[in-house]
Structure formats: C-alpha cells, structure tokens
Amino acid sequence: MGSLPLMLLFTAIAALGQGPWQGDMNAVIASCSEHTYLKTGKRVDGIMYSCTSLGVKLGGGLGTAIAGWLLEMSGFINGDAAVQPDSCINMMYFMYLWLPFIFDIIITVILSFLNVESANMKLKENMQNQ
C-alpha cells in the first residue's frame, strides 16, 4: 500500500485503459448528434459539443470540491502539519485507489449499453426502405 513505484505503475495502466475512451469521445458525440438528426431532422452538433464542454468543466470543479470535502471529513490538517491523522491517510488511499476503480466500473457498464452506431445504422436502413 505504501509503494510509490507500484502506484505509478497502476496509474500508467489506468491511463492506458482510459485513453481510448478519451480519444473516442468526440466521435461518440458526433454519432449521438447524427442520431438526433436521423430521428428529428434537426442538426444539434453545436449544442452537443457545448453541453459536453460544460459537463467536463462542471465535473472537474465538482470533483475538486468533493475531494476537498472528503479530506475535510477525514480530519485533514491544513498548514504545515508534518503528520496527518490515520483517518486522513485512509481517505487518501480510498480516494486514490478505490474511487477511480468504482467510477471506472460504473462508466464501463454504462458505455457497454451505448449502441448509438448500431441504432444509427438501423435508422438509415429504415429511411432507405421507406
């Protein structure tokens, strides 16, 4: 639990796992926008990207605030404290190891149900058959 090289190794592994989603996010947004166009005939590309940008900014701010609140609840000592309470150290372990793992599992489950590309193909086929 106290190994810095092990922590860095698993951080790198996590980044490799999250990289494809981060790189593919704009393509997914475009596919979702196309889905809206196919269903309604209205283009909403700009609003889709704006909402995504807003969500990223709000999520970053909220994530930072939650980290601060969790540390405060755990008894974090501000200032030049040489030692933090055990409750604070345990909270840091939880925040660094377990929270990202939990969120990655939730995101993986949610994204496994995201079938926008196949839905778009079905909509295009239905439009061609009409």
Image (cartoon, rainbow, N blue to C red):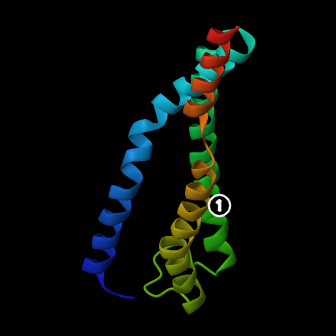
Q: Which residue is found at the position 29% from the left and 79% from the top? A: 6
Q: Residue 130: image x %, image y %?
A: 71, 8
Q: Quadrant of the N terminus?
A: bottom left
Q: Residue 105: image x %, image y %?
A: 56, 64
Amino acid type at circle 1 is: Ile
Q: Residue 58: image x %, image y %?
A: 63, 41
Decide which of 66, 22 is in the foreground and name it: 22
Extreme residue toward the front, this view: 129
Decide which of 113, 102 is in the foreground and name it: 113
Q: Quadrant of residue 32?
A: top right
Q: Residue 20: image x %, image y %?
A: 38, 46
Q: Which residue is found at the position 30% from the left and 63% from the top? A: 12
Q: Residues within 10 Å of mark 1 (few under 14, many from 20)?
A: few
Q: Which residue is found at the position 61% from the left and 58% from the top? A: 109
Extreme residue toward the bottom, this view: 86
Q: Is residue 115 above or below residue 67?
A: above
The residue identified by callout 1 is 66
Extreme residue toward the right, this view: 40
Decide which of 121, 108 is in the foreground and name it: 121
Q: Is residue 49 above or below residue 41?
A: below
Circle 1 sits in a helix, a strand or a loop, which is it?
helix
Q: Please indicate whether residue 9 sits to the left or right of residue 42 in the image.
A: left
Q: Quadrant of residue 5?
A: bottom left
